Image (tube, coloured by chain):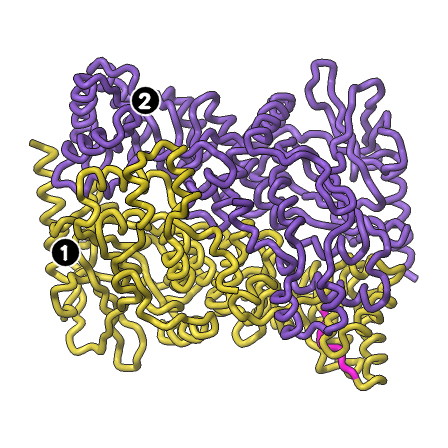
Chain colours: A purple, B yellow
Amino acid sequence: MKGMDERLLNGLYTDRYELTMALAYWREGRAEEPAVFDTFFRKAPLDGGFAVFAGLGSLLEALEAFRYSDDDLAFLEKDGFPVDFLEYLASFRFRGALLAPPEGEVVFPLETVVRVEGGLLEAQILETMVLNVLNFQTLIATKAARCRRSAGERALSEFGLRRAQGLGGLWASRAACIGGCDTTSNMAAARRWNLAAAGTMAHSFIQSYDDELTAFRRFAAAHGDATVLLLDTYDTLRSGLPNAIRVAREMGECGQSLKAVRLDSGDLAYLARKVREGLDEAGLEKVGIFASNQLDEYVIQSLLRQDAPIDAFGIGTSLATGQPDAALDGVYKLSEAGGKVRMKTSETVAKATFPGRKAVTRYYDSDGMMLADAIHLTDEEPPDRMCHPYEPHSSLSLAGRENRPLLTEVVSDGRPVIDPVSVADAAKYAREAIGTLPAEHQRLENPHIYKVGLSPRLRDLRDDWLQQNRKAMES
Amino acid sequence: MKGMDERLLNGLYTDRYELTMALAYWREGRAEEPAVFDTFFRKAPLDGGFAVFAGLGSLLEALEAFRYSDDDLAFLEKDGFPVDFLEYLASFRFRGALLAPPEGEVVFPLETVVRVEGGLLEAQILETMVLNVLNFQTLIATKAARCRRSAGERALSEFGLRRAQGLGGLWASRAACIGGCDTTSNMAAARRWNLAAAGTMAHSFIQSYDDELTAFRRFAAAHGDATVLLLDTYDTLRSGLPNAIRVAREMGECGQSLKAVRLDSGDLAYLARKVREGLDEAGLEKVGIFASNQLDEYVIQSLLRQDAPIDAFGIGTSLATGQPDAALDGVYKLSEAGGKVRMKTSETVAKATFPGRKAVTRYYDSDGMMLADAIHLTDEEPPDRMCHPYEPHSSLSLAGRENRPLLTEVVSDGRPVIDPVSVADAAKYAREAIGTLPAEHQRLENPHIYKVGLSPRLRDLRDDWLQQNRKAMES
């Protein structure tokens, strides 16, 4: 049972250009030249102020599987790669280090989220896989955290597999449960990561009977106290509700209880109120109301601001696909090679990368709430003052603040050095971490920007490089 | 080597509610009651006028693998399903029929795209998987077709794996190559479906050297005539271009040719023109220009309207994730059960489904161009006149038009009855099918709506049902 998806995970989980670069490095004997890469993103997803780091567990499994079988090598030979290079790849495995936050950590734009250290070839070749796993799962965990913020303590279920991006739906459910969902409808994901599975009934079940009342009765007969009845196949208030009340009473006569009813169309605020009234009048105060149909963090917020008496939400497409973004623009950039600092310069300072081997230190205020993150070089102490990354005259004192490193080593000499993290652990970590993020950074729209800065030394190193490059271009 | 992803594909590739419904059907002895389900979508993706049907090959593989192993059953038992039902699932396999268009076919809103016929339980339980595969691959193939329309005959490569939705990236590349891409950067997908793989170099390769010229030389030494050089690591026109010209000349002295240069930032129209001039002045007319960086069908259209001298495009995130939609809202609806017509009614006629076992016939004009599609009952001949689905007084004569059925049987008695279709075959089919779709339906924005109508008998059946339901609700 180890891994339902490991057959996808091998050394071909990459873009072709990683291999063309690898070949060139190998030809020149540069494969093992020490190198450092940073993964980071430039803008928080979904117009928000933060992201929930997810995918680390999947990445460690993919890393373990990143090898080349004889079949893989035969394909690469057919694709034009020379045989002597393929002999090298036959024994390839990553032997370097990965540093990362715990899965579920709150992270921000510009800061290094994962640092990869190793030989130039092995560290380069992982790029596509690292980004593919982390970009997607971080996007979905962040979306789920936003939905959780809107839903408060109400139950939240991820329902999106049917419109998820194919096999991507498997990881969507994993990440949604890290970011804030209680359950998922996705059975493959539930088995794979020990998630709680949830599900009710479809309209087709009701349509398959000659009348709705019979359908409700038969479903209740099969499911007893777990029964949730869908009300809107014909008409929510004129048919679904009275039939559900009748079945709930019949169940009561047999010592059973209807668990909930589900609303899946129409004006959910209005219908929830009417259905609640109807249920309460029938003495069915304990029957819950479950709502679905194109929900997202904004719709949930609106429903609850209208005091809609909804106990649980099912969120499908927008969560499983991370709409409206659909992708997180994380990048993977070289910051050191051959013992030298490296940097991508650019015509605009905002598109340049930060050079050198970098750590991130998180600072807290006296109430234990997150205050700021400083990016600095690994060979300097966490700074007492940090500089704005792009505003030359703006800085922030960090003196005397509690702090801790954001990244710790998770892979060393190519092997995981942390225990496998369960989705439940990561979800708990996320909940607690989000609890230390001040509310103004959590707003759905126009959040207060969390401060991420540079140590003075890193800032100077970056500026010197930019200036040198400018001179070189002008000469 | 059969299937890299089959470990994902099994009977748990489903939402939990399919199984709760299945349990209820099985308890009542209704599992084998004959049923018919339709898959269709209500709105063309990406604000366009058509969709390219993709995913059939993947669906047939997933269908073959849709079984329950002992591990799967142990999970379901832990999840609360009763042992006698699990004994039934142990020998479950789909024994019904699937009808579908060829992969690569052009399809439209409202019409049945896949018809599933079988026992009520087996046909219901496939819902999630059918939708997951077809919704995603059809979205991506349609996006690729739109990019192809903008790019004309220029080379088009799919580059999106790093920001694709996790494992979904595998199918994204497959579908992109069906819809119109020539190549993909995704090595796993290239091996799996025999796609042409393409790739150049990243900025990190150049940064890893002390200077750009050395990096270009070393890459050219490793790749010879396949060399593509990335120009924008430091400065496209002041550094990248002169260095590339120098290396191209050095290659020429050794009897080699630089294949192309790549532009990945800045104003691509301006830079392409400047780079073309520079290359031409250096006698390097044959060196191609490859452009990437947040491209989509609109940017490509704009670049070519400005006569940007670009020979090839690499399209990443927007293609691999189907932005801006990110999902196609295909649904799976019951239309017949137990020998009776079934229909989801609704307060609005546009949200009701079409009842009964339905076929789709496509009609052509005298030039062999697509004219209209009629949805009708399987027990009637293709109609000579079709009705607008929602406008009571609008109809279209189809008398004397060439026509053919859109759907044919692809699975019978649970087994595929068509030969496996390669991506190359599906891509060829798509290209030819799109060639018969009049240009006004292919416009990127505000396309002319292709006519999809109902046979008079189907329209009357639908209207009678709606009226009966209305009466029942009012009584």
The foreground one among A29 and B258 is A29
Report crowding for label 1: few under 14, some 14 to 19, many 20 or more residues within 10 A (C-alpha).
many
Q: Secondary structure at mark 2?
A: strand
For badge 1, the amino acid type reads Arg
Q: Quadrant of residue B428?
A: bottom left
Q: Quadrant of residue A81?
A: bottom right
Identify the subunit bearing mark 2.
Answer: A
Circle number at residue A265: none
Residue picked out by circle 2:
A288
The foreground one among B435 and A401 is A401
User: Do the residues at discs 2 and 1 belong to one chain?
Assistant: no
* Residue at 22% over, 29% down: A220
Identify the subunit bearing mark 1.
Answer: B
In this rendering, the answer to whether A357 lies above or below B287 is above
Range of residues picked out in magenta: B256-261
- Residue B76's x, y, as percent? 38, 38
In this rendering, the answer to whether A195 lies above or below A253 is below
The foreground one among B386 and A31 is A31
Q: Main secondary structure of the magenta part?
A: loop
Report crowding for label 2: few under 14, some 14 to 19, many 20 or more residues within 10 A (C-alpha).
some
Residue picked out by circle 1:
B459
In-image side of B223 versus A473 (left or right): left
Instruction: Note whether residue A473 is visible.
Output: no
